[in-house]
Image: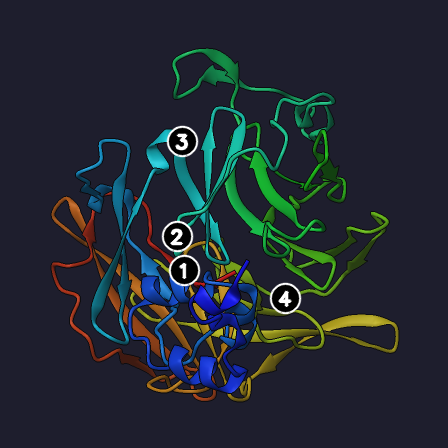
């Protein structure tokens, strides 16, 4: 073929020039298309561009979805408090079930016993990565409750009822080593942990410590560097290694203010030595009492100590998880961003607040969401976007 008649080979542009061009792009979808032109452009442009707002945003509840012109799609809305702007994405989520949570830039959907993934930014769909929750040996057979509750499923048939509370991807789904860890429930009160890797034929249950006198109900879990951390209502932390399924327990005690207190394990892009937790003392009270603790080992014993400085980082807290992210322009370091949900007639109004970790002072984030974040349904959740 005579290459003199062909157009220029744009993949041969110098990486510095490609990066400079990418930094001039102001729309996220255009940036995604730019990175998809060829491998050279993808390598030269950052997957986490600082000049674009990639969250965290609030994933607005399903009762605020907007119908799309495409009958198979719905428009999902994400509110960016820091730009006072709503990002909207047309996604075929209804085809793959209901959205149960998000991890990285992926929505996790569940229809019956099957989980699917949809990338909010690129629209990529992964519907066959993971086996059915019913794949033998079914996780029901290994649940430590020893009981199966059979209820009517959304499809109207009788079968095992799996309630998924939270799901975490260990890496991008295109990675062959990617795994998904879920907390699931087969009864009204007991939560279990299970995981599977891409290509697995069934799920593996991570055994929680036996529940004797005094409940040991799991409150939260997170993944970091090949390890899954799970915290129970006594603030004991179980650590599971997904490579060899070994387990250790960090028996550190932390007192509660009331039975309504919530605890969260901190996860995110910032690595830290030893698990951090956030205790939200009775979130239904008017006063805001959020405290950060670190679990550490001293003379063979595990203890908690109060943390008042997390460096040049911020925390984002919702009803299911707490994220730690490097501070960016417009944010205030060493703060926890969270929302307060107040009742107004039959709606819930959402107000964003920020708490200074050092002195526990509370302020309002300077964007008015009155009327915008009013919902009848569940809590909105923080969403972080990756262009992977």
**Picture coordinates of residue 304, whole percent (x, y):** 67, 73
Q: Which image quadrant for residue 59?
A: bottom left
Q: Which disc, if any, is residue 383?
A: 1
**Picture coordinates of residue 61, whole percent (x, y):** 28, 48
Residue under pointer 4: 254
Query: Is 267 placed above or below 89 here?
Result: below
Left or right: residue 145 compared with residue 210: left
Residue under pointer 3: 97
Mark 2 and mark 4: span between their CA atoms? 38 Å
Query: Is 94 placed above or below 171 here?
Result: above
Q: Nearer the viewer, mark 2 or mark 1?
A: 2
User: At 54% from the left edge and 35% from the top edge, which residue is drawn?
Assistant: 189
Secondary structure type for disc 4: loop
**Picture coordinates of residue 50, whole percent (x, y):** 42, 80
Residue under pointer 2: 120
Q: Nearer the viewer, mark 2 or mark 3?
A: 2
Left or right: residue 263 compared with residue 51: right
Do callouts 2 and 1 mark residues in contact (Cβ within 8 Å)? yes
């Amino acid at each position: 073929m005579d290459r003199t008649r062909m157009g220029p080979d744009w993949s041969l542009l110098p990486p510095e020039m490609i990066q400079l061009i990418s930094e001039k792009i102001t729309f996220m979808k255009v940036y995604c298309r730019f990175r998809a032109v060829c491998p050279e452009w993808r390598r030269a442009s950052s997957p986490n561009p600082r000049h674009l707002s990639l969250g965290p945003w609030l994933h607005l509840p399903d009762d605020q979805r907007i119908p799309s012109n495409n009958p198979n799609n719905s428009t999902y809305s994400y509110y960016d408090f820091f730009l006072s702007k709503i990002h909207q994405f047309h996604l075929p989520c209804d085809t793959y079930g209901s959205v149960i949570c998000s991890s990285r830039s992926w929505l996790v959907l569940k229809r019956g016993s099957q989980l699917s993934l949809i990338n909010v930014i690129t629209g990529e769909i992964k519907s066959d990565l993971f086996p059915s929750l019913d794949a033998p040996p079914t996780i029901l057979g290994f649940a430590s409750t020893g009981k199966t509750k059979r209820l009517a499923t959304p499809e109207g048939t009788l079968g095992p009822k799996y309630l998924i509370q939270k799901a975490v991807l260990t890496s991008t789904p295109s990675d062959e080593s990617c795994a998904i860890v879920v907390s699931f429930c087969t009864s009204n009160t007991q939560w279990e942990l299970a995981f599977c890797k891409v290509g697995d034929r069934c799920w593996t249950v991570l055994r929680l410590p036996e529940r004797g006198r005094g409940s040991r109900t799991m409150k939260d879990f997170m993944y970091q560097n090949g390890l899954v951390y799970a915290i129970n209502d006594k603030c004991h932390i179980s650590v599971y290694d997904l490579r060899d399924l070994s387990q250790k327990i960090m028996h550190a005690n932390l007192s509660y203010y009331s039975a309504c207190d919530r605890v969260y394990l901190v996860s995110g892009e910032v690595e830290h030595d030893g698990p951090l937790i956030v205790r939200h003392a009775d979130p239904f009270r008017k006063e805001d009492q959020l405290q950060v603790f670190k679990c550490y080992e001293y003379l063979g014993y595990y203890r908690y100590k109060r943390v008042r400085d997390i460096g040049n980082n911020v925390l984002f807290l919702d009803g299911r998880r707490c994220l730690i992210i490097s501070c960016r322009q417009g944010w205030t370091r060493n703060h926890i961003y969270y929302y307060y949900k107040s009742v107004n007639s039959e709606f819930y109004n959402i107000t964003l607040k920020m708490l200074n970790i050092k002195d526990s002072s509370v302020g309002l984030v300077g964007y008015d969401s009155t009327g915008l974040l009013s919902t009848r349904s569940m809590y909105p959740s923080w969403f972080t976007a990756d262009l992977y």
